[in-house]
Image (tube, grey):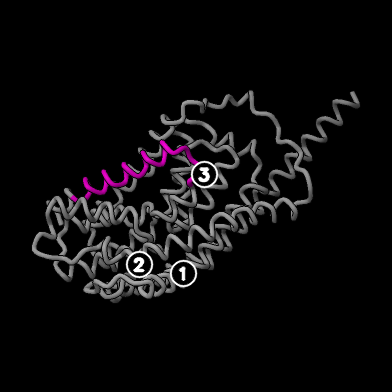
Amino acid sequence: MSQLKSTLHDEQTTNRKAIWFIVSFLVIAVVGLLYIKWWPYYQKGMLAADTHSIGSSILGDPSSTTLSWKSAWDYAQVYFSSVWKAALLGILLGSLIQVLLPTQWLLKVLGKTSFGSTLIAGLASVPGMMCTCCAAPMAVGLRKKNVSVGAALAFWIGNPTINPATLVFMTFVLSWKFTLIRLIFGIILTFGISYLANRFVKDQQPIEMDQIIADAEPTGSFLTRWMKSIGSMLLYIVPAYVLSVLLLGAARVWLFPQINSSANSLIAIVIFAIAGMLFVIPTAAEIPIIQTFMSLGLGGGPAAALLLTLPAISLPSLIIVAKSFPKKVLFFVVASVVLLGIMSGLVGMIFL
């Protein structure tokens, strides 16, 4: 009898500790997002409603054709000045996922290959409103906790593609047609492609709830475990992140060629879909980029391709998550983003 009471007491203590850890994580996430995302985006929404603009294109002078390391450095400075707070928050939350959120709880919610886990993760991404690179460390953290491929992808891709703030800005600056196209294809990409990606992981079996065991007792203090988690993330993520942004900053004159009379053709749609998939931008930066390009004569087709592919993924974000997902999954995601971007472009060619 005493042994049973001791067991029940241990279980209650473990459950209280798990609840405390989950609440702590949520408080940190809410405070960080309120300061870095929600309040600034509310102000930007007011600006977009009043001026029908949220700023100039991050690409700079679209007529420039000079490939140089100066242009790479200039772009990197502008880019990182815009995202550094969100990037640090993403790394912080990605590390805390590993040490605060109980594995057993995460697996119950997001561990299955079912559409339900994908749906929950995609919906959980909506308040984040992170760009693809800032959301990537959190996807890495989720995968380190053995969350299913589909759920981790839905959270990663959903952050930039079904970002509600971006959809609001888009409606004020571009038009409701752009918003509708982005929302439809963003939902397909976030929930449909992420769910299908589970099929590329043959050794991943659905988790039976009665087979989930309690978390193993963590070794070492919380501070030690957290420092180890965030240290490994910083060592792997930051160098690859910075170098790839510099590379793309230098190559942007090649990725986005001069706009001419063929700027609304199928070839242009394919080119801009691929370029958008590779390139890296801050949250919502696709809006002024598209606005600038269209003022120079870019057609609705390529603009709609960029609408989806620019925010969805990028070369730097793919590098960040490269060790967390099977290569077949990432190739499938890349191909899907480009294909859906082309389909979005074809729709845009007709309706925009």
Q: Position of residue 117 (x, y in %)?
A: 48, 36
> Element type at marker 2?
helix
Identify the image quadrant of residue 129: bottom left
Q: Most prominent secondary structure in the magenta stretch?
A: helix
Q: Position of residue 311 (x, y in %)?
A: 36, 56
Does 240 sit above or below residue 20? below
Q: Tell me the number on the disc at residue 323.
A: 3
Quadrant where the image shows the C terminus: bottom left
Q: Is residue 329 left or right of residue 259?
A: right
Task: Give the spatial CA distance, label 1 vs label 3.
Answer: 23 Å
Counting the numbered discs, the total is 3
At label 2, counting other C-alpha atoms closer than 10 Å, the crowd grade (few under 14, some 14-19, many 20 or more) is many
Q: Tell me the number on the disc at residue 199.
A: none
Depth check, front residue: 17 or 291: 291
> Element type at marker 1?
helix
Quadrant where the image shows the N terminus: top right
Residue type, numbered disc 1: Phe
At x 34%, y 71%, the residue is 58
Tell me which label, 3 or 2, sits earlier in the chain.
2
Task: Give the spatial CA distance, label 1 vs label 2.
Answer: 15 Å
The residue singled out by tag 2 in the image is 250
Residue type, numbered disc 3: Lys
Task: Give the spatial CA distance, label 3 vs label 2.
Answer: 26 Å
Range shown magenta = 322-345
